[in-house]
Amino acid sequence: MPWCPMISSFNPSSNRTYPKKAWLFWGLAALFYFYQFVLRVSPGVMSQELMRDFAVQGCALGILGAFYYNAYAAMQIPLGILLDHFGPKKLMAVSCLVAAAGTYLFSTAESLHVASVGRLMMGAGASCGFIGTLKLATLWFPPEKVGTVIGFTMILGTMGATSAGAPLGHAVDYFGWRDSLMGISAIGLGLAALIYLLMKEPNRKYTHKMAQISDKPEPTTKMGILDGLAIVATSKQTWLIGLFGCLMYVPLAALADLWGSPYLSERYDISSKHASAITSFIYIGVAVGAPAAMWFSDYLKSRKKVMYLSAVLYFIAFSAMIFIPQIPLTAMSFFMFLAGFLFSGQNLVFAMSTERMPTKISGIVAAFTNMIVMLSGVVFEPLIGWLLDYHWAGNLKESGAPWFTIDDFTFALSAVPLALFFAILALFFIKETYPK
């Protein structure tokens, strides 16, 4: 690889040597992760407009939003297998193209069925964003750097979620939700082209040398396509780690991604644009907390200790946000930031899952774990919508959208702290994985 002179002097005994262009390739992948976060949380910004234009109530909107998670979760294992065997470059470019096409279809949909197909395509395309970035990190970076790269990836991803708050809210107010999504679709097309033209993958010699500096067991024989999946799927610890990640992700999937904006709009009688800006403080907290959690875990030389502390305080913070009635708006902004910061212990599930398995199947490991995590949106976005409809008195706003009261939201969102309580219980059965 003549473009990278550092590889020729690579020393397996030095686990800090890697080409600096690895950060460029990671940056392209992480931009895709940024983009898919914009797509993921966009319905929360335009929830009132969607319920009005498609003439639906809470449960139907929850199902529409969850179509993204349905496709996202379903694609994880196939993509994990393909990433391990074909590499991330072409798969990420095609996936970004599919996400952009789905966004365009959603923006032009005149019926709920067509919008659902567009949302499915958005989720299917976006499904490669995180695991593709993680796979690229395990290929280019030494093992002790992967946790840091995951932290930086989360920072960029949550910036995407923040961009889908107030900035997208302004765009929706000015251009309308359809034209705003068309613009986002065009950006996705450009990003797909950049990934295909600029991203590179390491050669086999470099990958072999990276494996030499890892203390993880590596297979000595060639593995078939399904062998890696069998190793991961039969691991009880991988299931438990994924379950913890899924339950910890419920507040983001259910509140930050969809129901946070209408909830705060009703609670404080503010515009959806203002409410989206407040909700985005969760993702600002995640951006700050992700590297902090990784650093603290490395400092303590423990994953579980940080995850315990994160889960318990996260449970307390969200319970306070939902059940304490007299919280000023400025204090709620702080609670949102704090909740996002405390959520960051959840990011350690990807470090834990990949630390337990050979590097050769890191794509499948990340995909399998992410699939379980994303089931949070599949289950809880429609569930909270159904709980809202169940508790709803049947009143409508002037726009024709359902009028959910604070009591309705409190009843429905009580599912969030309950999920966090079970996340804490799951930790009792998870074993420490910090590298020795």
Image (tube, helix red, strand yellow):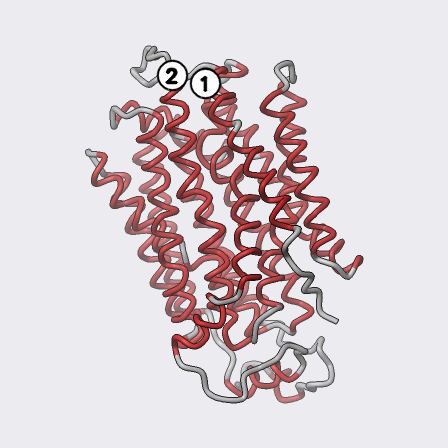
Give the number of marks.
Answer: 2
What residue is rendered at 25% in x and 28% in y? 54
SS for callout 1: helix
Q: Are marks 1 and 2 in contact (CB under 8 Å)?
A: yes
Give the camera-side residue of 63 and 33: 63
What residue is rendered at 46% in x and 74% in y? 228
Q: Mark 2 points at which residue?
A: 392
Mark 2 Cα-neighbour bin, 10 Å: few <14, some 14–19, many ≥20: some
Q: Is residue 412 left or right of residue 21?
A: left
Mark 1 Cα-neighbour bin, 10 Å: few <14, some 14–19, many ≥20: some
Image quadrant containing the C terminus: bottom right
Q: Is residue 101 left or right of residue 42?
A: left
Q: Position of residue 82 (x, y in %)?
A: 38, 71
SS for callout 2: loop
Q: Which amino acid does label 1 sit on?
A: Asp
Q: Farthest residue toward the right?
A: 299
What residue is rendered at 49% in x and 61% in y? 28
Alpha carbon distance from label 1 to label 2? 6 Å
Q: Position of residue 45 (x, y in %)?
A: 43, 31
Q: Mark 1 points at which residue?
A: 408
Q: Position of residue 105 (x, y in %)?
A: 25, 44
Earlier along the polypeptide chain: callout 1 or callout 2? 2
What residue is rendered at 57% in x and 56% in y? 241
> Relative to 218, is 266 above or below?
above
